[in-house]
Image (cartoon, coloured by chain):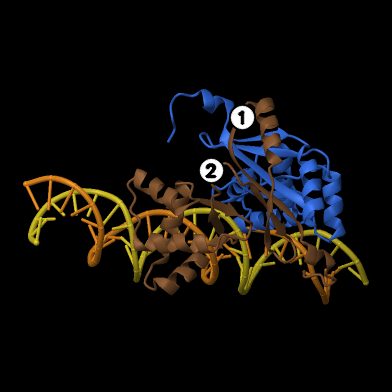
Chain colours: A blue, B brown, C yellow, D orange
DNA sequence: CCCTTCATTGAAAATCATTTTCAATAGTGG
DNA sequence: CCACTATTGAAAATGATTTTCAATGAAGGG
C-alpha cells in the first residue's frame, strides 16, 4: 500500500501521523518481504527513535491493523506478526511455512478466489477475508540430510 | 480419529494412557463439533476429575497435538484452540469465522487439494499440512440489522 | 511381592506477549 | 497564547502458557 493512501486513511479517522508512527511505517515499507513481530519492530524502531516505548509499538500496530494497513497474522510461534496489506484486492499471496527451518515463504496465487466463490455459494457465508497457511518443507530442507529435530 | 488408533500412537512412543488423559480425550470425542481452548477443556474435565491441574491439561494438549491426534489452531482470540484431527487424509474442512458473532463454522471441502498440487508444482515446496481460515459474516449476521460493534 | 526406575501429576511460581494505567507531552483549532 | 484531546513512555497489570519441584504411581526385574 502506498504511503499516500495510508495517510489518507489515518486522517479520515482523525489519527495523527506522529514521528513514532512514521518510523514504524517506514520499517514496514523498508521490509516488505518480512513478517515482523512487535518485538522485532521495536528493536528496529529504536535505532532511529531510541526513546520509543514498546507500548507505543503495540498501539501503533493495533491501529494500523485496524485501518487495514497492516495484516496481523499468526504463524504459531506465540507472537503476532505483521505485514503491509497488499493494495486493495489485487496481489494475493499465501504463506508457506517450513517445518524444519521455520522460514516463511510467500507464494503468489489467485486460485483461492474460485474456492471462496464456491464456499459462498454453498454455505451462505459472506467471506471478506482469508488467511491461508501451508506447512511443509522448503526446497532447501527437502534436500538437507540432517534432520534438525 | 478412532480411540484405537490414538492408543496405538501413544504406546508407540511409550506414553501412558492415564486417567487424566483418558478424560481429556473423551472430552474431544464427545465434542467433535467444537474448538475447545485449554481453559474450556479444563472446566469440562473438572466435572469428572475435579482434582486435575490446569498444567496437566496443557501438557496433555501439547502431547496430543504432538501426536497429531489434535490440531492446534488459532482463531485470533488470544488463546489456542484444539480439535480432533480428521482421520488420515480424508475429510477436509475449513473454518468460517464470523466477524460479528465470533462463531466458528465448519465447511467441508476438497478443492484445496488442487491448489496444493499447483503450489507444489510451481514452488518446489513440499506441503504436508495447511490451515485455512475464512473471515466474514454468517447467514444470521448478514441479516441482522443491529451492528454489534 | 518388594524395590527401583521413570513417566506423570498437582500446585505454585515463573515466563512471555500483550494491554492497561496514568501522568506528562505535544498538536490543533480557536 | 489557551484549551482540548490525542498520543506517548514507563511501570504495573493481565492472561495464557510453561516450568519447577516434590509427591504419586505404574511397570518390570529380582
Q: Of the two numbered discs 2 and 1 on the same chain, state the one appearing first in sequence.
A: 2
Q: Which numbered dot is residue B88?
A: 2
Regarding mark 1 in the picture, which secondary structure is present there? loop
Are dots 2 and 1 in contact, CB under 8 Å?
no
Badge nearest the viewer, 2 or 1: 2
**For the C terminus of chain B, which image quadrant?**
bottom right
Q: Position of residue A120 (x, y in %)?
A: 80, 52
Q: Position of residue B145 (x, y in %)?
A: 85, 71
Q: Nearer the viewer, residue B57 or B86?
A: B86
Q: Would residue B14 appear left or right of B115 to someone viewing this image?
A: left
Q: Nearer the viewer, residue B66 or D13?
A: B66
Residue at 82% of width from left, 64% of height from top? B142
Q: Nearer the viewer, residue A13 or C22?
A: A13
Quarter of the rendering containing residue B13: top left
Quarter of the rendering containing residue A58: bottom right
Identify residue for label 1: B125
Residue at 32% of width from left, 47% of height from top? B14
Q: Which numbered dot is residue A90?
A: none
* CA gap, disc 2 and disc 1: 21 Å
Crowding at mark 1 (Cα within 10 Å: few <14, some 14-19, many 20+) = many
Residue at 79% of width from left, 66% of height from top? B141
Q: Chain of mark 2?
A: B
Regarding mark 2 in the picture, which secondary structure is present there? loop
Q: Position of residue A144 (x, y in %)?
A: 49, 24
Amino acid at each position: 500500500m502506498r504511503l499516500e493512501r495510508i495517510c489518507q486513511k489515518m486522517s479520515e479517522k482523525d489519527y495523527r501521523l506522529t514521528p513514532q508512527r512514521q518510523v514504524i511505517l517506514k520499517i514496514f515499507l523498508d521490509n516488505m518481504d518480512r513478517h515482523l513481530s512487535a518485538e522485532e519492530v521495536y528493536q528496529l524502531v529504536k535505532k532511529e527513535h531510541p526513546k520509543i516505548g514498546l507500548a507505543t509499538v503495540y498501539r501503533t500496530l493495533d491501529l494500523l491493523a485496524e485501518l487495514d494497513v497492516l495484516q496481523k497474522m499468526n504463524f504459531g510461534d506465540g507472537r503476532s506478526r505483521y505485514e503491509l496489506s497488499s493494495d486493495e484486492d489485487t496481489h494475493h499471496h499465501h504463506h508457506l511455512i517450513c517445518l524444519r527451518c521455520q522460514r516463511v515463504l510467500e507464494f503468489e496465487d489467485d486460485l483461492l478466489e474460485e474456492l471462496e466463490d464456491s464456499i459462498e455459494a454453498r454455505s451462505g457465508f459472506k467471506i471478506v477475508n482469508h488467511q491461508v497457511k501451508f506447512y511443509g518443507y522448503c526446497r532447501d530442507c527437502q534436500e538437507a540430510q540432517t534432520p534438525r529435530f
